[in-house]
Image (cartoon, rainbow, N blue to C red):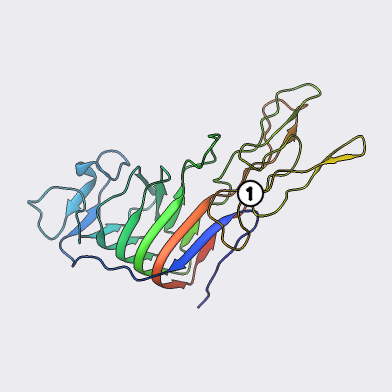
């Protein structure tokens, strides 16, 4: 059994706390008959009460196990009894989206991630979980690598571009909780702006800058943000927020 908490130029936050949710009700299984949107009724089958066609409601058990499926979560769903995801990806969009469940299981080849990278001036997306028990099986992952602020975009000529985010600077490595590699020009060193905490990270990492001679090329993207509020966390797979 491995407990994994990685924080390299980024961002992951694990908070242990008591979370209580309602009792279980029906089991709803993802069928993806329509779009990849969590909130489309046709994408779910109620295996407990087939005549009840709906999306998961408070206390329900949701199962996503369609090989290669990607499910988009654009805002907070109902508070679930449980969620099991296997061989599929659940992608969070919108920084305020919160997935709440009594038990959350990420099985083999299951992935929780968020949309990104992004160029907004504030955090756009993150993985945000609240549960009593989080179990990440071997081969399962919560992964927001390179899902933070985007790297700077080369525009051509003798021009340096800054990475996006509060810690982006022209030609320099992006920062979060510590400085990125400085840009050096004619012997002078130019450092990125520092923001956030290395020991209690909350926000995405900033993107790296780039020299403009190769048009369309980008600097490295910052890593995304993970926030987990749980009573018990067991990780046999991986949780990563790297860049």
User: Residue 243 placed where, x, y %?
Assistant: 63, 50
Q: Residue lying furthest right in this view? A: 187
Q: Is residue 232 above or below residue 172?
A: below
Q: Residue lying furthest bottom in this view? A: 1
Observer-nearest residue: 189 or 239?
Answer: 189
User: Residue 203 placed where, x, y %?
Assistant: 54, 50
User: Residue 89 placed where, x, y %?
Assistant: 41, 51
Q: Residue lying furthest top in this view? A: 157
Residue drawn at point x = 39 percent, y = 46 percent: 96
Which quarter of the picture shows residue 35?
Answer: top left
| Viewer can see residue 108 | no
User: Residue 108 placed where, x, y %?
Assistant: 43, 64
Side (left or right) of 18 relative to 49: right
| Secondary structure type for disc 1 | loop
Q: Is residue 171 above or below residue 31?
A: above
Disc 1 target residue: 195
Residue drawn at point x = 20 percent, y = 65 percent: 22
């Amino acid at each position: 059994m491995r407990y994994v908490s990685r924080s390299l130029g980024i961002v992951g936050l694990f908070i242990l706390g008591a979370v209580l949710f309602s009792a279980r009700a029906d089991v709803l299984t993802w069928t993806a008959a329509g779009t990849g949107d969590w909130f489309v009724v046709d994408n779910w089958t109620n295996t407990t009460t087939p005549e009840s066609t709906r999306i998961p409601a408070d206390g329900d058990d949701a199962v996503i196990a369609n090989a290669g499926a990607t499910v988009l979560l654009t805002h907070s769903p109902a508070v679930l009894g449980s969620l099991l995801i296997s061989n599929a990806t659940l992608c969070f969009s919108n920084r305020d989206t919160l997935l709440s469940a009594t038990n959350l299981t990420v099985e083999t080849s299951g992935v929780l991630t968020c949309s990104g990278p992004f160029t907004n001036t504030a955090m756009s997306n993150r993985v945000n979980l609240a549960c009593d028990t989080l179990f990440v099986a071997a081969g399962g992952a919560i992964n927001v690598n390179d899902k933070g602020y985007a790297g700077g975009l080369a525009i051509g000529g003798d021009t340096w571009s800054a990475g996006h985010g509060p810690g982006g600077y022209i030609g320099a490595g992006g920062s979060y909780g510590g400085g990125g590699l400085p840009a050096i020009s004619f012997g002078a060193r130019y450092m990125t702006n520092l923001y956030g905490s290395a020991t209690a990270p909350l926000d995405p990492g900033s993107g790296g800058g780039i020299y403009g001679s190769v048009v369309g090329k980008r600097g490295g993207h910052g890593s995304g943000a993970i926030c987990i509020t749980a009573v018990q966390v067991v990780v046999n797979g991986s949780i990563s927020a790297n860049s």
